[in-house]
Image (cartoon, rainbow, N blue to C red):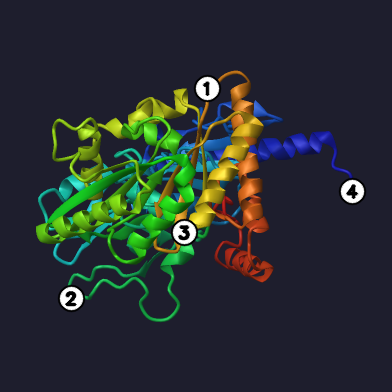
């Protein structure tokens, strides 16, 4: 049967009317001033956009924005879409600081956006047991400030202090202590039906149960990480014991020693000489930390009692000097006001100690502008593969990045985060000017990074909104991807939640 143009137009007009009616009911839930309606028409369908993003990805067409302030408002809004009768799907973000991967943007066109930054309550906290219940709009600066002077600290990232704890953890972001997903012990989730459930460990008012994320039976917390199965409205986040003392040993080495120097650093990690995530910066990334041109930079954190810190930092510096691989070794930059890198070293040590700098000084030094202006003014892309922690693999990583520079003219920064003695999270960054051919070259460089690293077996663990198809291409087992889709159909038969970067 052929659909006549007039019938198509009537159908689109009816769909637009239905959508506006649903948004009107959402406004009754959250308040009229907290709903943005579509304002442009494309092929008869009213749409809007979320504005620019720092990566200059194509702005997706969205059907409106809803900004709830409570979990109950989220539940009621989701219920409005639960029957699947509107053409729009719900896309959520926490604070929108997913820079380099898409910022606030949905993966596809045609979503109604749930902006969860208004859910900003720290609902409960127990410093002695080491947990806090926080909503998606709670920033790492705010939670860290609450813990100042206490026996506990937050596992913070080196991103802006004003980014979401929950949003970053749900996307497997990396803190200075470990991947943040390890800090998630429980989640409150609004299912596509509008039902609210709590999975994993959750505080019980009348008894003190030990914090244990997995519970009995299948562990469900990870089901909602990098997923489109529901809307997370709160999380129980683990708070880490605060060390009595802490020091960061700073080392430099030249590019010709990448393989040997990183192998030596791995030996220290495997033998327990380091605490938290050892960070290795290539020449481009090291500049923001005051490193001399032409040098790689390493940060090795040691902590514990003062005696342990003195002993471990002494061992690391002796081992570094004895190896003959490092051009500079220092464990006193933060304690010596006369050191050339004193201010930076102090900020680095404070971050390892759970104190993100609310002024974002280091973040701005790396990005070239404040977080609030990044999407409007910056040019920035991320590529995030996992690489084996061997000198050979990290030297190969360096070669692949150099190959991309030779092919595209884009010089990439690279930060190697040692998550363990076996695996490194390689954060590859591309900064570019927002005009001219440099935008196209940066995006071509990103495409080449995907191609070259994946061919080498170095698989990304986070995707951007322009490379969502790689979720299928990289799946180790087609049956597992099929099972995930069966779960989606079972939990969300009307596909109320918009497909994301990992759908």
The structure residue drawn at horizontal position 15% and vertical position 30%, both measured from the top left corner, is 338
Q: Which mark is residue 1?
A: 4
Instruction: Point out the tag, 3 or 1, that comes first from the N-terminus.
Output: 3
Residue 151 position, x and y percent, is 12, 58
| Disc 3 packing (10 Å; few <14; some 14–19; many ≥20) | many
In this figure, which residue is indicated by the disc labeled 3?
A: 389
Q: Residue at x 21, y 33 (%)?
A: 343
- Check whether the beta carbons of the residues at disc 3 and disc 1 lie within 8 A of each other: no
Q: How many labels does the image show?
A: 4
Quick one: 321 or 263, which is closer to the camera? 321
Mark 2 and mark 1 residues within 8 Å of each other at the beta carbon: no
Q: Position of residue 355 (x, y in %)?
A: 21, 45
Mark 3 vs mark 1, CA separation in Å? 33 Å
| Quadrant in the rendering for residue 220 | bottom left
Q: How far apart are marks 2 and 1 (CA)?
A: 56 Å
Q: Do the residues labelled 4 and 2 touch (CB within 8 Å)?
A: no
Q: Name the residue under label 2.
A: 207
Where does the image place residue 148, in percent across and percent down from the top left? 13, 48
Chain-order first, disc 4 or disc 3? 4
- Please tell me how crowded label 4 is: few (under 14), some (14-19), or many (20+) other residues with Cα within 10 Å: few
Residue 433, label in figure: 1
What x and y, as percent, mark residue 86? 60, 47
Q: Which mark is residue 451?
A: none
Task: Please indicate, yes or no, whether residue 179 appears anywhere in the rendered image.
Answer: no
| Mark whose residue sits in front, 4 or 3 | 3
Quadrant of the snapshot with the C terminus: bottom right
Q: How far apart are marks 2 and 3 (CA)?
A: 43 Å
């Amino acid at each position: 049967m052929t659909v006549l143009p007039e019938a198509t137009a009537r159908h689109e007009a009816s769909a637009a009317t239905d959508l506006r009616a649903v948004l009107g009911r959402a406004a009754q839930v959250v308040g009229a001033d907290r709903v943005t309606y579509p304002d442009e028409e494309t092929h008869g369908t009213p749409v809007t956009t979320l504005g620019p993003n720092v990566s200059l990805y194509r702005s997706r067409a969205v059907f409106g924005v809803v900004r709830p302030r409570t979990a109950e408002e989220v539940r009621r809004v989701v219920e409005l879409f639960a029957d699947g009768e509107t053409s729009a799907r719900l896309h959520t973000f926490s604070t929108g600081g997913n820079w380099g991967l898409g910022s606030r943007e949905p993966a596809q066109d045609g979503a109604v956006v749930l902006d969860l930054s208004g859910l900003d309550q720290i609902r409960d906290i127990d410093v002695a047991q080491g947990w806090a219940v926080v909503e998606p709009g709670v920033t790492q600066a705010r939670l860290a400030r609450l813990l100042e002077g206490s026996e506990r600290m937050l596992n913070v990232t080196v991103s802006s202090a004003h980014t979401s704890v929950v949003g970053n953890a749900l996307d497997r972001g990396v803190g200075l202590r470990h991947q943040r997903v390890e800090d998630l012990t429980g989640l409150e989730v609004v299912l596509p039906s509008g039902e609210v459930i709590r999975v994993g460990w959750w505080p019980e008012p009348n008894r003190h149960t030990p914090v244990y994320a997995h519970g009995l039976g299948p562990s469900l917390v990870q089901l909602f990480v990098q997923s489109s199965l529901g809307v997370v409205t709160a999380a129980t986040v683990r708070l880490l014991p605060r060390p009595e003392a802490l020091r960061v040993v700073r080392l430099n080495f030249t590019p010709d020693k990448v393989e040997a120097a990183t192998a030596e650093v791995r030996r220290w990690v495997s033998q327990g000489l380091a605490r938290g995530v050892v960070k290795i910066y290539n020449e481009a990334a090291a500049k923001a930390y005051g490193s001399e041109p032409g040098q790689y930079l390493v940060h090795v954190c040691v902590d514990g009692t003062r005696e342990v810190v003195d002993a471990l930092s002494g061992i690391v510096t002796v081992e570094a000097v004895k190896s003959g691989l490092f051009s500079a070794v220092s464990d006193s930059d933060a304690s010596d006001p006369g050191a050339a890198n004193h201010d930076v070293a102090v900020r680095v040590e404070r971050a390892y100690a759970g104190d993100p700098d609310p002024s974002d000084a280091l973040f701005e030094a790396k990005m070239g502008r404040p977080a609030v202006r990044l999407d409007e003014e910056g040019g920035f892309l991320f590529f995030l593969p996992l690489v084996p922690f061997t000198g050979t693999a990290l030297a190969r990583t360096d070669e692949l990045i150099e190959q991309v520079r030779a092919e595209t003219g884009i010089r990439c920064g690279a930060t190697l985060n040692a998550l363990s003695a076996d695996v490194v999270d390689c954060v590859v960054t591309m900064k570019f000017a927002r005009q001219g051919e440099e935008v196209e070259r940066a995006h071509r460089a990103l495409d080449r990074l995907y191609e070259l690293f994946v061919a080498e077996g170095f698989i990304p663990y986070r995707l951007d909104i322009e490379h969502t198809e790689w979720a299928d291409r990289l799946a180790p087992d087609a049956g597992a991807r099929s099972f995930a889709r069966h779960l989606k159909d079972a939990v969300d038969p009307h596909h109320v939640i918009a497909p994301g970067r990992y759908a």
